[in-house]
Image (cartoon, helix red, strand yellow):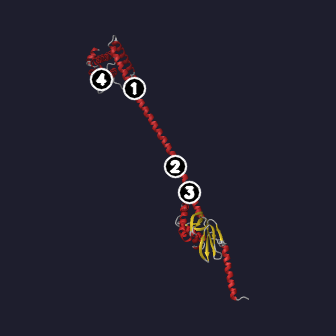
Amino acid sequence: MLPISTMIRRAGSLQRTSQRLQQCLVTQQPRCLSGGAVNTVILFVPQQEAWVVERMGRFYKVLQPGLNLLIPVLDKIKYVQSLKEIAIDIPEQSAVTHDNVTLRIDGVLYLRVMDAYKASYGVEDPEYAVTQLAQTTMRSEIGKISLDHVFKERESLNINIVESINNAAMEPWGIKCLRYEIKDIELPSKVKEAMQMQVEAERRKRAVVLESEGIREYEINVAEGKKNATILASEAIKREEINRADGEASAVIAKAKARAEALTRISQAMGAKDGANAANLVVAEQYVAAFSKLAKTSNTIVLPSNTGDISSMVGQAMAIYGNLANHQKQLDAADPEDHDATPKEEIHSTQKIDRFLLTGQKSVIPGEDSLKERLSLGHPDEEDKKS
């Protein structure tokens, strides 16, 4: 029969052993550490591994890849560190943004052991320590920005987390964080619905803006078309008016030249034989034709007192024609160069003759001299006596 004290010690030892076994089953073996290597005197260390050796419980050296020799019993391989890049899953955790929105975020951390000694003796569990550091750093960085910037500045957020981990773990632990990537960002259901409504509203807004821009472009094109059509129409009207004015001017000039030529020929014909008789016949015909048109109008007309005496009227007209012919001869003899200006005077004189045939007055154009002064005619009384 064992003493009570011994039984108590054994019970405590069994309890501690069960606790250790439970911890080993629950806790994952760190990938940065390994104690599976055994001292066999002659050792071959694999590439990209570092074996930490203790001699009599104290750090001795770090074995490099290749052939190594150790003393049995005295030397013990305490830690085996992998120098390869290691990927560690960061568990999902909650974080609060600057605008008080709670998120669920997880990620992946990539790291590498740079100093096997510090990784073995600087921290108890390097992987667990780096994981906790990544989680706290991520929560701290997300708390500095709003929800919209979490999605926009995802790359800069990863860089900030890497810098924070390296500042905390590189020097004391000998572990370097290469990069950190955020995998998933889970939002609350209400926030998702609000963001979905915002996206839909933004799309509707863009659709309305595009439609309004299309209508504006259409209206601008229509206005430009009307403007160009109006300009072209005004140009056409302007050209038409110019052409009409040119035509009328040409017609007036042609009529004036024809009238001047006619007067010249009349003056020449009156100097020929029987020219006076022909002129008398023409004047009489025009006199009769002018009086035949008077009845067609309803206006009040002032007529000379001797309208029935055709011979008197014809005599006066022939006297005017005679003086016109004499005046033409004087102009031709005085200055042949001014012959071009003669038709204008003849046209005015002819107008006076035509009006004389209708009214019996020698001057009917206001602002001009009488036919007596222009054509050197005799006194009207003398002409009446001659008639």
| Residue 201, numbered label | 3
Q: Name the residue that disc number 2 marks.
A: 213
Q: Badge 3: how crowded within 10 Å, few (<14), some, or many (20+)? A: few
Label 2 element class: helix
Residue 352 visible in the current orientation: no
Say which of 167 and 212 sits in front: 167
Whether the residues at callouts 3 and 4 have beta carbons within 8 Å, the answer is: no
Q: Is residue 200 above or below residue 41?
A: above
Q: Name the residue that disc number 1 marks.
A: 250
Q: Is residue 209 above or below residue 322?
A: below
- Count the marks: 4
Which of the two discs, 1 and 3, labels the residue nearer the N terminus? 3
Which residue is rendered at x = 54% and y = 53% of the image?
A: 206
Which of the two discs, 3 and 4, labels the residue nearer the N terminus? 3
Callout 2, which amino acid? Glu
Q: Badge 1: how crowded within 10 Å, few (<14), some, or many (20+)? A: few
Label 4 element class: loop
Whether the residues at callouts 2 and 1 have beta carbons within 8 Å, the answer is: no
Side of 16 relative to 318 (left or right): right
Say which of 154 and 325 sits in front: 154
Q: Name the residue that disc number 4 marks.
A: 363
Say which of 250 and 210 sits in front: 210
Rounded to the nearest angstrom, the CA distance separating label 4 from label 1 is 29 Å
Label 1 element class: helix
Which quarter of the figure has residue 178? bottom right
Which quarter of the figure has residue 102? bottom right
Callout 1, which amino acid? Ser
Which residue is rendered at x = 43% and y = 34% of the image?
A: 238
Q: Position of residue 43 (x, y in %)?
A: 65, 70
Callout 3, which amino acid? Ala
Rounded to the nearest angstrom, the CA distance separating label 4 from label 2 is 76 Å
